[in-house]
Amino acid sequence: MSLIHVEGLSVSYGARMALSDVSLRIEPNEIVTIVGPNGSGKTSLLRAIIGAVKPLAGSIVHASNLKIGYVPQKLHIDETLPITVSRFLRLPGGLADVDYALKQAGVPELEKEQLSQLSGGQFQRVLLARALIGKPDLLLLDEATQGLDQRGSASFYQQIETVRKATGCAILMISHELHVVMSASDRVICLNGHVCCEGAPAAVASAPEYRALFGTGTGGALALYRHEHDHDHGDHCHNQDAE
């Protein structure tokens, strides 16, 4: 059974339509990436999935007892707040397997560090650890590498693949780093207010709808990926009129 089944989802903010008739499924143990230009509704989709936005129309069905972990785009912490990583991961209280979560996030050495002293990459790993504490079935990441350099981003996405292998959770992530994301994904969904293209990374990268939005600049970086990783994921690219 699908972990998430979105059908005919529409989301609006007043008169502005953010999403129109979006349908998709997230299956167990797969990595799915949502790409799209600014204002294409990517974050609105994640917020609708976690229940932070009420849909105008359509439905979102979660698998029974589905546990979701969420890594936000940003989290602002007062730099003067004296709090260790371990204490942060235990908020708002109660028991938490901090050792497990930090190990899965690839930063077991950070447990006793002050949150305010972490680098941007370390802080994102701690946010990843926090999302993993509940041992989720589905991990949602909203541009979790924004602000990191290319090396830091690549390292983060490698850790995401490690998390998937170690825990078996599915991952749905938004990213603007096309060259990295494509090679890290089983399936890509190209969003621009509606689903304009989806499928295996190589198929999406060569689709006219994708190239109309992003050009052909990522094609070269995908050549090796396309050669080595073409497999039997369903591909579905189609034109729709933008809202």
Image (spheres, rainbow, N blue to C red):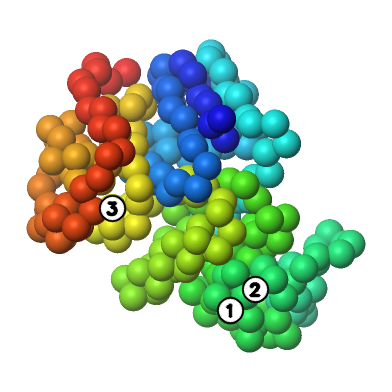
Q: Quadrant of the N terminus?
A: top right
Amino acid type, mark 1: Val
Q: Is residue 57 above or below residue 124?
A: above
Which residue in the structure is indicated by mark 2?
A: 102
Q: Would you identify the image quadrant in which residue 107 lies?
A: bottom right
**Residue 36 in sight in this render:** no
Gap between marks 2 and 1 measured at Cα: 5 Å
Q: Is residue 215 above or below residue 9?
A: below
Q: Is residue 208 left or right of residue 179?
A: left
Q: Position of residue 66 (x, y in %)?
A: 67, 38
Sort mark 2 into few (<14), some (14-19) or many (20+) by Cα contacts within 10 Å.
Answer: many
Which residue in the structure is indicated by mark 3?
A: 182
Disc nearer the start of the sequence (3/1): 1
Gap between marks 3 and 2 measured at Cα: 26 Å
Amino acid type, mark 2: Leu
Residue drawn 64% across and 31% down? 63
Which residue in the structure is indicated by mark 1?
A: 107
Amino acid type, mark 3: Met
Helix or strand or loop: what does disc 2 sit on?
helix
Pointers 2 and 1 in contact (C-beta within 8 Å): yes
The one nearer the camera, 177 or 37, is: 177
Sort mark 3 into few (<14), some (14-19) or many (20+) by Cα contacts within 10 Å.
Answer: many
Disc nearer the start of the sequence (3/2): 2
Helix or strand or loop: what does disc 1 sit on?
loop
The disc at residue 115 is none
Q: Position of residue 180 (x, y in %)?
A: 30, 60
